[in-house]
Amino acid sequence: MKIRTDFVTNSSSSSFTLNLMIELKNGKKLKYEALGYEEPFGPGEYAEVSAMLSPKELAECPDIAALVDMLKDSIECYGEPILTDDDKFIQKVKKIPSMQEIAKISVTGTEVYDPENEYAQVYTYDCMKQAYTCEIDGEQWGAINGASGGNLYVPDRKLAKESNEMNEADELQEKEEFVVEYDVLVRYNGEGGQVTIPDGVQEIGSDAFDDCLENLTGITFPEGFTTIQEQAFVSTALTSVTIPGSVKEIPPAAFMACVDLTEVILLEGVEEIAYDAFADCESLRDVTLPASVTKIYDCAHGYSFFGCPQFIIHAPAGSYAEQFAKEKGYPFEAL
């Protein structure tokens, strides 16, 4: 059966999934999913999802406002817009500082006919390389009774170069110990132990150490390093960590559930410890904080040190950290 390059399906038993992802240069990914069924069952599910989307056209919008408008105008259910200003995805898109911060945009449409048969296509535009590619997988079934869970139509699909296999650059990336994109460490492929982040890396992505959770015992940050993303080191085997002062905030859940972590040292310059930053670090014994720290979450949003049964805060006398320790009943020792 012929594989079509547009995506219009009409199987009475099919379901349709639309996925949209905007990847930023700092490694963060904004994701949206809409599910199309003949009979929707819950939130995010529709009787039909119809989309006319081109990642290339989205990437070429003059500003974020135009990008938002195009997104809202491009996805609908029976002629009614699905994406509105109240949608969390749209709210996140509005917070992107500028179009120049976007690295890639991808649009995926998947039609599932039964557990063993599906038809999928992925269109991706790389803003930095100005490369437009598509991947087609499976065969599209013919119309049955005129019913469908939805459709995706890519107006400029003929401009996308079909690429069904990993290219040489991707294969090379898989072999590299550190995969760095736009100064962000997005993946670590090494064996673990005491890891020294390469010079030039300014940020660590949230999924960078997913393949090395049980083997990462230590980390050394390079000069000029500024940002740790949420959950970057969650559940790793770190035993001790020193955060340079160039990192202003320890984000939510950055070191959550590091059960072997016994010592944390924040150097002068760090200002804030977000909620759950060190939650469930049950072996934590010593926390050294500088005078520059002026905010530690211990409120309804979460506790920076929740699930840490016994640790001492070491900090300068008269600092915010001392006041925090006394108010919350944590042991304190002046430096």
Image (tube, rainbow, N blue to C red):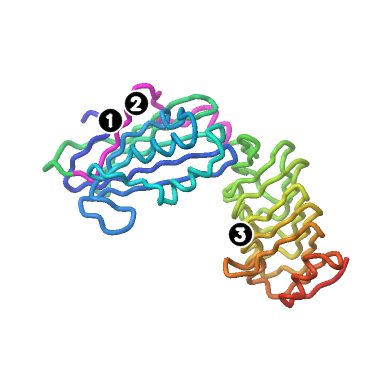
Q: Observer-nearest residue: 335 or 190? A: 335
How many angstroms separate mark 3 from mark 1 (CA)?
Answer: 42 Å
How many angstroms separate mark 2 from mark 3 (CA)?
Answer: 40 Å
Q: Are marks 1 and 2 in contact (CB under 8 Å)?
A: yes
- Residues drawn in magenta: 148-174
SS for dot 2: helix
Residue drawn at x 30%, y 53% as measured from the top left: 45
Q: Is residue 297 magenta?
A: no
Q: Amino acid at mark 1?
A: Asp
> For the view shown, which residue lies furthest in the left direction?
145
**What label does residue 157 carry, if any?**
2
Q: Amino acid at mark 2?
A: Arg
Residue drawn at x 59%, y 42% as measured from the top left: 186
Q: Amino acid at mark 3?
A: Ala
Residue designated by label 1: 6
Which quadrant is home to the C terminus?
bottom right
Name the quadrant containing residue 283. Answer: bottom right
Residue drawn at x 66%, y 47% as measured from the top left: 191
Judge left or right: residue 48 versus residue 191: left
Residue drawn at x 44%, y 34% as measured from the top left: 66
Residue designated by label 3: 253
Indicate which disc, 3 or 1, sits on the residue closer to the N terminus. 1
Position in image of residue 284 (x %, y %): 72, 68
